[in-house]
Each structure stands twice: as structure tokens, then as C-alpha cells.
Image (cartoon, rainbow, N blue to C red):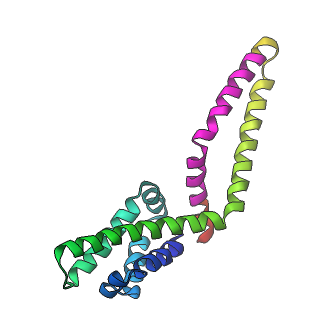
Amino acid sequence: MRLQIIEEVVDEVSSNPVISGWIKKDRVRAITASYLNSLTDEELIEKSTTDQLAIELAAIIKTEIRSSNPVVGPDEFEAVLNRVDTDVRMGVANGICEVTVSKGETIDILFGKIDGELKHLANETVDKYSGEVADKVTKRLDRTMAAVPCGLPVMLLTGFLRLMFGLMR
């Protein structure tokens, strides 16, 4: 995921002719790689899900641009820095999406495993009871199971990202 984010951020920031005149592609790559490599896998996952990753990375790139002292009016300069924010956010999002799309089969497998485990646990619970108690337990489990998918995608994405970092090392 780190590599995809690096390349997507570089592509987005470098696609603007004004910004690319103030900061070179190789410098954006070096800054982005240095920042991402300074994070643990857990930090990277957490920051990417809260938008903190894009905010911090944009701040570093904007500091680099400011230090280059481009000759331009303050209003235009702020507009360009706002564009850097947008480009970095898009690059981070595109990098995460690229990993998610390319690993769609793995995500489907994870959904299947979780669904199977939940059904197995439900069946084990119901098997312990009989008659009216079993019916009540079954109805309660059905209601509970119906509510599970609401938060499941977030849990799966986090688990998926942790799985991917484990596989990529």
C-alpha cells in the first residue's frame, strides 16, 4: 500500500504545472516515501482511515514548497497550496483504492469466512437449546445478525489492511 500511495501522490501533485514547477517529482517521491516509511503499519492504517495521513503529508509538502520561496502573490500562493491539499488527498485515496481493487478477491474471501464463522457460532448456540427457548434464541440471533453488516465493512477493511501489510513484508 505504501508504494501505491507514493506513486499516486507523486502523480497527482506533479500533474499540476504550477506546483510541479515549485517542487520536483523526485522530491515529492522522497518526501512521501520518507513520511510513509516513518509510520508503523498500524499508524499507517489508522491515519489513512481518519484522513490524518493526507493532512500530515500535505503539510510536509507545503512546507517544502514554502521554503523554496516562489515569487508569486499571496492569494495565488494560498490557492496553489490549497490545490496541494486536494492533490495529496486524491493521491492517498487513489493509492488505497488501488490496493483495495487489486485485492478484491481477498476481500470476498474474508467476507465469506466471517459470514461462515458467524453462522457456525449461531448454529452452535441454537443447538444448545430446544423448543420455545430455541425459537426465541433463533429470533434474537436473526435480529442480531441482521445488524452486523452495518459495521462489518469497516472491520473488514481494517483486517484486510492488516492482512495485506503482513503479506507484503
Tally the marks: 0
Please provide percent x and percent y for residue 79. Answer: 27, 71
Vertical side of 15 occupied by 98: above or below: above
Please provide percent x and percent y for residue 125. Answer: 74, 27
Please provide percent x and percent y for residue 112. Answer: 74, 49
Q: Quadrant of the C terminus?
A: bottom right
State yes or no: residue 11 in magenta.
Answer: no
Determine the residue positioned at 75% across, 14% down: 133
Vertical side of 111 occupied by 142: above or below: above
Q: Quadrant of the N terminus?
A: bottom right
Determine the residue positioned at 39% across, 80% down: 16
Can you tell which quarter of the image residue 59 is in?
bottom left
Determine the residue positioned at 40% across, 71% down: 87
From which residue to which does the magenta span run?
A: 134-162
State yes or no: residue 147 in magenta.
Answer: yes
- Along the horizontal axis of the image, is 80 left or right of 114? left
> What predominant SS class does the magenta segment belong to?
helix
